[in-house]
Image: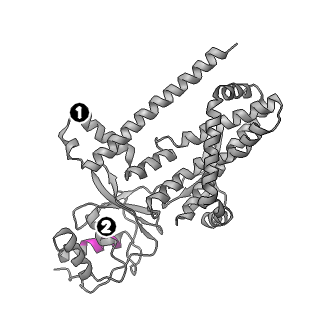
């Protein structure tokens, strides 16, 4: 029996809360992520499917969308293509006016009319639910994390204006330059800190507070750029307990600049947190022990901030690198491409130029990062060897 034709005057519309990402590299392909904020699921589609889906706003008919598609790609979609696409969107609960479907078996895949399969993709920042255990678990601290982020944004939004933020960042640059010039003194202060348990506990508490502010800064910047914070809580991997702030729709924030700012907000907060202590360490008359403790805090806090900017997963610097290069799954895609290059396999040449440049640049950045880390570790080790009594 032949399936009924899809009415050409039908005006499909996506459900409220369906988010579409920009074009992203994924291996040799260009993909878009579609996120259903209601179900929390994300899916990958190709540029042709994205072209069609992005126009489903309830104002255009299938005939009008099809005409746009033919003008862009040089071919018209047949009725079977439309049926397949609409069935797929309906099965994913992405179309307005359709009841939510029964849960599909894990791993089930469906074809798409324009030739690229839609595959489930992990939601950025999401963590599968797990039973809370003594040694490993998490707990939410607030019932409505997005409302909390909204209130925090209201309190801090004046700090986000360029007239305030740029001078603060300039002060952090002055601070870090000064600390670098006095690195030997700070290394000695840090070594001395570990011989004073009370001061060590005080510094560790301040660094923990800096970590908590780091997480909240991500949430505030995400809210500032139109995102939604889904969870704020505590996560423990004993003996470590840290705060976390989950931004589910990070990859769907409007504008690459906003996504980069959101990823960088945590490290910036760590540095801003140090400014009052730097002022005291620089300007106030202090006894030797207090000066050493503050010096250790400044060094360890700076290391904490810059470590988060390393372009290695799952650090914030990795997210920044992925945004700069316009990729998702950047580390895995780079590893796969470089393996092909090293083996001189023909498949490497089939990667588009943009992908080849992005993966080569990221591979070089990781190699340079590892060299710099090794050099820094060697320099610190040499300092302690030459200054040890």
Residue 264 highlighted magenta (yes or no): no
Q: Which residues lie in the magenta part?
A: 84-90
Q: Residue at x 37, y 53 (%)?
A: 326
Q: Tell me where residue 300 appears, x and y as whole percent.
A: 65, 35
Residue 250 in view in this figure:
no
Q: Is residue 141 above or below residue 360?
A: below
- State the predominant SS element of the stretch in magenta: helix
User: In the picture provided, is 315 more to the left or to the right than 201?
Assistant: left
Q: Quadrant of the N terminus?
A: bottom left
Q: Tell me where residue 346 appears, x and y as whole percent.
A: 17, 40
Query: Residue 20 lies in what quarter of the image?
Result: bottom left
Instruction: Work out which residue is located at the far bottom of the displayed protein and give it.
Output: 9
Please tell me how crowded label 2 is: few (under 14), some (14-19), or many (20+) other residues with Cα within 10 Å.
many
C-alpha separation, residue under disc 1 versus residue under disc 2: 34 Å
Q: Residue at x 39, y 81 (%)?
A: 97
Check residue 343 in the rendering and tell me which mark sits there, or answer none: 1
**Residue toward you, 384 or 14:** 384
Q: Is residue 98 above or below residue 37?
A: below
- Residue assigned mark 2: 50
Q: Tell me where residue 313 appears, x and y as whole percent.
A: 46, 43
Q: Is residue 73 above or below residue 8?
A: above
């Amino acid at each position: 029996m032949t399936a009924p034709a899809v009415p050409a005057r039908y005006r499909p519309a996506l459900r409220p809360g369906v988010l579409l990402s920009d074009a992203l590299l994924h291996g040799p392909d260009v993909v878009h992520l579609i996120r259903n904020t209601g179900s929390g699921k994300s899916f990958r589609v190709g540029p042709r499917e994205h072209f069609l889906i992005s126009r489903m706003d309830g104002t255009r008919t299938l005939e009008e969308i099809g005409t746009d598609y033919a003008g862009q790609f040089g071919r018209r979609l047949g009725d079977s293509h439309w049926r397949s696409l609409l069935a797929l969107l309906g099965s994913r609960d992405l179309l307005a006016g359709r009841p939510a479907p029964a849960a599909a078996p894990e791993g089930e895949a469906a074809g798409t009319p324009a030739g690229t399969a839609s595959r489930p993709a992990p939601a950025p920042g999401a963590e599968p639910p797990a039973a809370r255990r003594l040694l490993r678990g998490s707990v939410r601290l607030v019932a409505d994390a997005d409302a909390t982020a909204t209130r925090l944004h209201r309190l801090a939004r004046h700090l986000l204006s360029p007239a305030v933020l740029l001078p603060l960042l300039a002060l952090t640059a002055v601070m870090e330059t000064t600390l670098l010039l006095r690195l030997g003194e700070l290394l000695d202060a840090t070594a001395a800190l570990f011989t004073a348990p009370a001061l060590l506990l005080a510094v560790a508490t301040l660094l923990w507070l800096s970590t908590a502010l780091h997480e909240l800064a991500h949430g505030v910047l995400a809210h500032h750029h139109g995102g939604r914070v889904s969870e704020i809580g505590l996560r423990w991997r004993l003996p470590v307990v840290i705060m976390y702030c989950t931004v589910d729709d990070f990859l769907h924030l409007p504008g690459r600049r906003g996504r980069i700012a959101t990823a960088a907000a945590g490290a910036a907060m760590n540095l801003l947190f140090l400014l009052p202590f730097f002022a005291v360490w620089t300007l106030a008359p202090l006894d030797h022990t207090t000066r050493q403790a503050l010096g250790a805090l400044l060094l360890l806090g700076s290391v904490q901030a810059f470590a988060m900017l390393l372009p290695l997963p799952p650090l914030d610097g990795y997210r920044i690198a992925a945004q700069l290069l316009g990729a998702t799954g950047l580390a895995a895609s780079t590893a796969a491409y470089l393996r092909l290059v090293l083996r001189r396999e023909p498949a490497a040449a089939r990667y588009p130029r943009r992908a080849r440049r992005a993966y080569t640049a990221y591979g070089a950045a990781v190699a340079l990062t590892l060299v710099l880390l090794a050099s820094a570790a060697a320099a610190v080790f040499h300092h302690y060897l030459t200054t040890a009594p």
